[in-house]
Amino acid sequence: MVKFLSEEWIEYGKNYILEKLDPEKDMKNITTSLLGIIEHVPPNDITMSFYLELRNGKLNDFKVNTGDSFEGKEAAYVIRGNYGTYKDILQGKIGTAMALLKNRLQLKGSKMEALKIIKPLDGLIESLRKITDEFEE
Amino acid sequence: MKQDNVLALDKISLEDAVAIAEKGTHCGMCRIDFLGTGLCPSGKKHGFLAYWPQGRMELVKHLKEGRIKPTEKLIEIANSCTLCGICDKQCNFATQLRPEKVARALKDYVNNLDKSKFQSVVEDDILKGLREIVGKEWATNDPIIIASYIRSIIPPNVELNFYIVMPENTEQVSKIIKFANQKNIPFLPRSGGTALSVATPTVLSNATSLEHGIVIDLLRLKKLEIHPESSTAVVGAGITAFELQKEAYKYKLRANVAEAGAHYCANIATTGVITTWGNSYGCLADNFIDLVLVDNDGNIKKHSDMDISNPYTTEHGFTNISLSPSYIITEAIAKLFPVFDDEEAVLVPFDNLKDAMDMVLELGKRGVGLSLAVLSYKYLAEFICPTPRIAKDFEDICKNYMKLRYVVDVICDKDDKKIVEEMAEYTIDQSLMKTLILGSPKLASLKDSEFMKILSEEEDPLRAIFAGPMRKHFEKGLDASPEQLAKVYDKDLQDFFKKVYSKPEMTNVVWLHAFRILPSRLMRQRMTMGPGGAIWAGDKNHILKWVDMFAEVGNKYNLEHALGFISPLDNGKFIYIEYDYFYNHNDADAANRISKTLLETTEKSLVMGQIFTLINYLFKGIYRKEHVLYPLFKGLTKEEQEVFREVLHSVLGDYEQW
């Protein structure tokens, strides 16, 4: 169990996804990429982001960074929200779809295409929820 | 501490108080002075919901359940009630409840508490920050005050991890949002709270409420200016439909407003002010000249800003669903319209929907009338009858004896009235409507009478009663007077209601349409869920199929249901339909069936296509109708339907198993 957005979190996340999620059953063999921008990250109120790429349902890339972009990476979807929203999602207080519908997360990209991957995304979040137990206050 | 069951001052136990409180539906009618009684003094002074009758009713329930523990604030709240009786009069008009009894029970309960056992409330950093923005008095984390917001923005079964803050201007709203974002706390604005309270017992509970965080209560944004020279009004977010209309009427002007207790700005944000006046006054962005809003980053924007990107457009397709506003409207410059001296009401009764709809669309396309609607017998009965029992019998008489299933309801000038009268075989005019309002108890008492049996055997009962010789006897027999009507109220309130019903406006159908104090009666002691939406008017079969679908789903889930209203919009180019389901909001099984109904009717509507459902309508109010309603999206494909269901699963879990 690790701290959200830490290097450890990325490593645990990668391993967990590779070991526990079945590319076909859980991830529907999807090929997509997602840039998650996290604003107001405590304690210094900075912006961070993570980039996640799946190919045929298999994790291809997962990294974290400060700022709101990754050089050379053009994600199919960009979701933006504050740290509290991501924390609520990872603590199971609100689902990703609900956060989108309630405008807690802003989406850039086709909403219909994004909703098509909501099921595998839920599985992914569920995995990350299981390894994340520490947050900045 | 004294026992709960002996808390009476005048024999009102806490159990009895809770029994009253449970029937409350947060209609918000105790927060507007619609009967000339003045306002609840404590609510007016302190603002927070806990100080208003509806808030006290909510509080009592949670105290009795033991969900909240008393704090010092509870004493202040209980004792701030002067037992003036205003709430009993207001609430009795709308719902027949007696909130003052609840306040009495609460006072007695509080006075018998052991104060040494009160829980203390600590000012944390968040509260401190909020108080720096709005002043100490207007921000709180006191669980007693927080509990009063349950069911009208806070879901019933969550931890009370909230702050309530009452800003008084746009700048403070902006600062609160920036502060909330910086502290990573979610927030949600609250105005009248009626839409949220309707949703609370259902599947929409979590979707439309705040799970934790900052409730921004907008009641203190009370700016209201009428500018007769430009026929506009500057309206703050704390101003209700009734308050705006009252002020506008002083200048012989009228606003296009929602139900009396709804806040005008919130209504623009939520659904763009859906009314029966929409065909001539407009809908969605037609309603306003300009808006001041605060976005989710706390930026203050005006629609008139030169550098703003197009604020009037929204995406299409079912994915445009939004369950929260992405902005808070703090001020609107509303359009106002002239009130003419020769305005009248004329209603045309029908026994079937198709003919009624044909007529209302014809009137809409011709631009006849200011307010146009098809109302069902149910609306008519609920609106004009003083109690639910009388409404029920009145409804049976309309439906089963008089064959009065629908009325085309028109507010118009005298020239348009002539057109309506020429188009109709017979009509109900203002004078007969006054008789029906004041004589509703007597009419209801005629259920199963010989007179009604004879009437029902007529070939055309409507003609017999509204155009034939029976009309004179019918009117006379109803014994319609304020004195007779007042007798249906509790003894101590009869004198008051005799005076109320002696006021000309209380039986003036034009005034009642403009001030909309009667729709709250649809919610009396129960909830009303009214899905529907907009549909182009060109294909009447499509419209009728849609209405039939609502009825079929209502029957499937064994719910009381009826068409609410159909109103043409934009010169009859499209119409808005509300279809209502009624249920006891304290019955979990009924709420479950309502949830299923809501999901099923929404999915079926999306599959039918060419329909803009209520769920799509939510938070589209600031956009232009041309962007929202053109084009209406085609029905869901199989693949899209699958996506829709997956989204529902993601949000609701295995909803088919409920």
Image (cartoon, grey):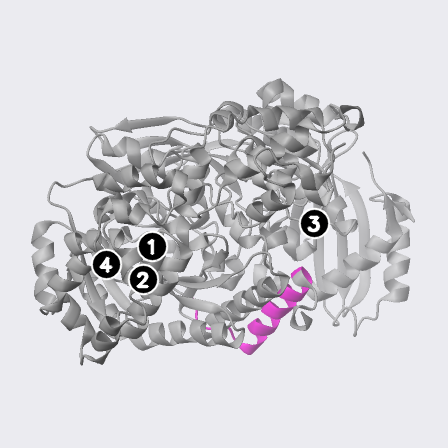
Left or right for B401, reference B596: left
Q: CA distance from mark 3 to mark 1?
A: 35 Å
Vertical side of B369 occupied by B339: above or below: above
**Are the residues tagged 4 and 2 within 8 Å (C-beta)?**
no
The residue lying toward the viewer, choosing from B117 and A97, is B117
Q: Which residue occupies 28% across, 52% down?
A: B278
Residue where numbered disc 4 is placed: B409
Q: Which residue occupies 86% across, 50% down?
A: A10
**Are the residues tagged 1 and 2 within 8 Å (C-beta)?**
yes
Instruction: Report the span colored magenta.
Output: B633-651
Q: Which residue occupies 73% across, 42% down?
A: B67
User: Can you give x and y, in whole percent of width and height, for residue B290 in the image?
Assistant: 36, 36
Q: Which residue occupies 44% across, 48% down?
A: B95
**First of labels 1, 2 by sequence position:** 1
> Which label belongs to residue B385?
1
Q: Chain of mark 1?
A: B
Residue B426 showing in the rendered view: no
The residue lying toward the viewer, choosing from B95 and A73, is B95
**In the image, which is nearer the foreground, mark 1 or mark 2?**
2
- Identify the amino acid type marked 3: Asn
Q: Quadrant of the C terminus of chain B?
A: bottom right
10 Å crowding of disc 2: few (<14), some (14-19), many (20+): many
Residue where numbered disc 2 is placed: B444
Q: CA distance from mark 1 to mark 4?
A: 17 Å
